């Protein structure tokens, strides 16, 4: 007497054989490929795609890009100010109001440099969204 456990269904056997053959062919294809270099993997994953070259912009696009840099600079300034508030100050080495003004100007410059050079892509993303740049 045959039941589901002891009988062999030809449809199930053919389906299993087909699945095994597909897996084997995929495995064979993976073995035959030469491994990619790290640079090729970065290009494939789009590490450099979408970067905006500000030197190629003109007119309104240049103004918009500069505004996006200022916006990113403002965001970095907020981060730096939040970090500055975590510093414990003592009266022994506190520079008073003069030090506060100096560090405020210094953090303005830091934030501008970070926006221009940090490659955080915030500026590029803002610019692409606002201008539909490709």
Image (cartoon, rainbow, N blue to C red):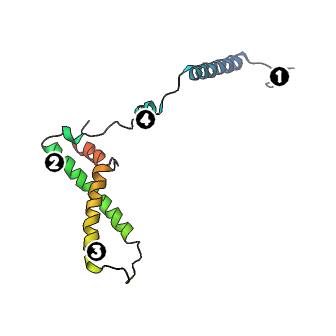
Q: Marks 1 and 3: which is nearer the front?
A: 3
Q: Are marks 4 and 3 in contact (CB under 8 Å)?
A: no
Give the secondary structure at mark 2. Answer: helix
**Marks 2 and 1, how far apart at CA:** 77 Å
Give the secondary structure at mark 3. Answer: helix
Compared across the picture, whether 31 is left or right of 127 comes to right
> What residue does disc 1 label?
6
Residue 23, placed above or below residue 78: above
Q: Which residue is most to the right?
A: 1
Mark 1 crowdedness (10 Å alpha carbons): few <14, some 14-19, many ≥20: few
* Rendered location of residue 45, percent (x, y): 43, 35
> What residue does disc 4 label?
42
**Marks 2 and 4, how far apart at CA:** 31 Å
**Marks 4 and 3, how far apart at CA:** 43 Å
Tell me which numbered mark, 4 or 1, is placed earlier along the sequence. 1
Residue 68, placed above or below residue 8: below
Foreground: 26 or 14? 26
> What residue does disc 3 label?
100
Q: Marks 2 and 4: which is nearer the front?
A: 4
Foreground: 44 or 104? 104
Tell me which numbered mark, 2 or 1, is placed earlier along the sequence. 1
Q: Marks 4 and 1: which is nearer the front?
A: 4
**Marks 3 and 2, how far apart at CA:** 32 Å
Give the secondary structure at mark 1. Answer: loop
* Rendered location of residue 113, percent (x, y): 28, 55
Q: Marks 3 and 2: which is nearer the front?
A: 3
> What residue does disc 2 label?
63
């Amino acid at each position: 007497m045959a039941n589901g456990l002891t009988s062999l269904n030809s449809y199930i056997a053919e389906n299993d054989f087909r699945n095994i053959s597909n897996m084997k062919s995929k495995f064979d294809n993976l073995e035959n490929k030469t491994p990619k270099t790290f640079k090729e993997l970065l290009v494939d994953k789009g590490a450099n795609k979408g970067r905006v070259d500000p030197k190629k912009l003109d007119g309104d696009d240049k103004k918009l890009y500069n505004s996006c840099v200022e916006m990113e600079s403002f965001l970095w300034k907020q981060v730096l100010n939040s970090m500055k508030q975590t510093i414990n100050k003592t009266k022994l080495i506190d520079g008073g109001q003069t030090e506060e003004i100096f560090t405020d100007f210094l953090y303005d410059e830091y934030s501008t440099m970070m926006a221009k050079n940090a490659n955080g892509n915030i500026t590029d993303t803002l610019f692409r969204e606002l201008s539909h740049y490709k």
